[in-house]
Structures are given as C-alpha cells and as structure tokens.
Image: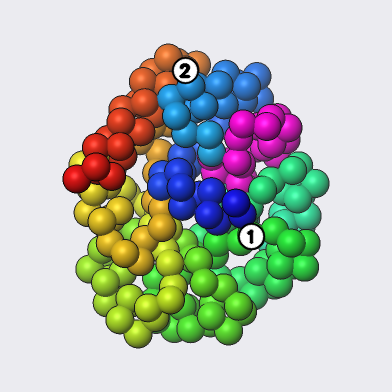
Amino acid sequence: MNTLSELSAFRVVPVVVLDNLSFATPLADALVKGGLGCAEVTLRTAASLEVIAVMAARDDMLVGAGTVLTTAQVDEAHEAGAHFLVSPGLDRDVVAHAQSLGLPVLPGVATATEVQAALRLGLSHLKFFPAVPAGGVDVINALHGPFPSVRFMPTGGITMATLDDFLSHPAIFAVGGSWMVPRSLLDSGDFDGVQRLTHDTVSHLATLAST
C-alpha cells in the first residue's frame, strides 16, 4: 500500500502543532492507541522537524510534514524522515523538488485554476484549503464536475460535527483536522485526552462506514 492509499484508509489525518519535543513520543502513542497511526506535523515550531524525526522512526506511524513553503523545507522534512509533505498553497518549485525526492506532496488548492496547475504537474491528490472558509463541500462538488479524477483532502475548519458531510463526498479521500489534537491538550500534556478524542473519531468513522 502506498502513502496516499494509507492516508485514504485512515480517512482522517490529525494536524499537529507541537512545541515540546519531549511530547512527541507520548503523542504518537496516544494517536496509535486511539486508532489513528498518522499525523501531519506542521513546520510552525522550532521543535517540528525533531518531532517528525521521532515519530517517523516508529514502525506504526505515517508522518507528514505540513506547512511546507520552500524547497529548503522539503529537504529538511525529507532528512527528518517525513513520509509525505503538505503545503497550504501550490508552489511549482516545492512540488517539483518533492517529486524529485520521491516524496508524495499534497499542495493546497481552492480554485479551478489551481487544480489545473496541479494537474499539469502530474498531481491527482490535493489538499483543499482552507476548507470551510473556501466554501466547503459545495466548492468541492463544483470542482468535481470538471475534474472528476482529482481527489481532495480538505483541511481547515473541519470538526466532528461536519466530518460526515465531507467524507460522504466521492472526491474526498481524507480530511485533515485538529479536533483530536487541540493545542490546549498538547500544551498541557494531556495525552489521555488526545487518545480519548482520537478513539471517538475512529469509532465515528466506523459507524459512518457501516451506514
């Protein structure tokens, strides 16, 4: 199973902002025990690359680097062991460099013009960002018509309350979200809370799959 297929199987990708390197292992443990062995660790903190390295060294986690803005960050994430990359926007240089390293990359798009540009770069799986402010499922439905082969990972503003609306759409292969890894729990080191919210999410996904 390749990386994008694995993300599709998880259906939900926790989007992590973590300042404390010592919390990397207990966070990974909480996600795995809760049933989601994946994470997008955003490059927004000084500890982010080391957090990625700790998580990527495990054999039970699929770890991506998020908020990748430059080719230098592509190199840094690759060296840290990231399994995939996520960007908020579409940057040709970032995409091309990731492709040259064999790293799956999910650049952010929100318009038809951006989707067309991504297709010209050989991409079929894209981040839809910011999902809710950009129009949510209605916009994805509109894009699905002219681009039926494209699959999206909406991220930005999605909650458990809106999860079903997104995952029920055939063009959506997964969603990114932080409701199971809120900064309040991460900052306080409440990993029992993270595990509980992750387990609740996985249980909800199971119920959704059975209906």
Residue 71 in view: no
In the image, what residue type sits under mark 2?
Answer: Phe
Check disc 1 and report its element: helix, strand or loop. Answer: loop
**In the displayed structure image, the side of residue 197 where residue 107 appears, left or right:** right
* Residue drawn where x is 36% and y is 61% of the image: 172
Q: Which residue is mark 2?
A: 191
In the image, what residue type sits under mark 1?
Answer: Pro
- Magenta stretch: includes residue 41: yes
Q: Which mark is residue 104?
A: 1
Q: Which residues are magenta?
A: 39-65
Residue 71 picture location, percent across and down: 73, 62
**In the displayed structure image, the side of residue 210 where residue 181 appears, left or right:** right
Quarter of the image for residue 70 reads bottom right
Quarter of the image for residue 61 reads top right
31 or 97, which lies in front? 31
Alpha carbon distance from label 1 to label 2: 29 Å
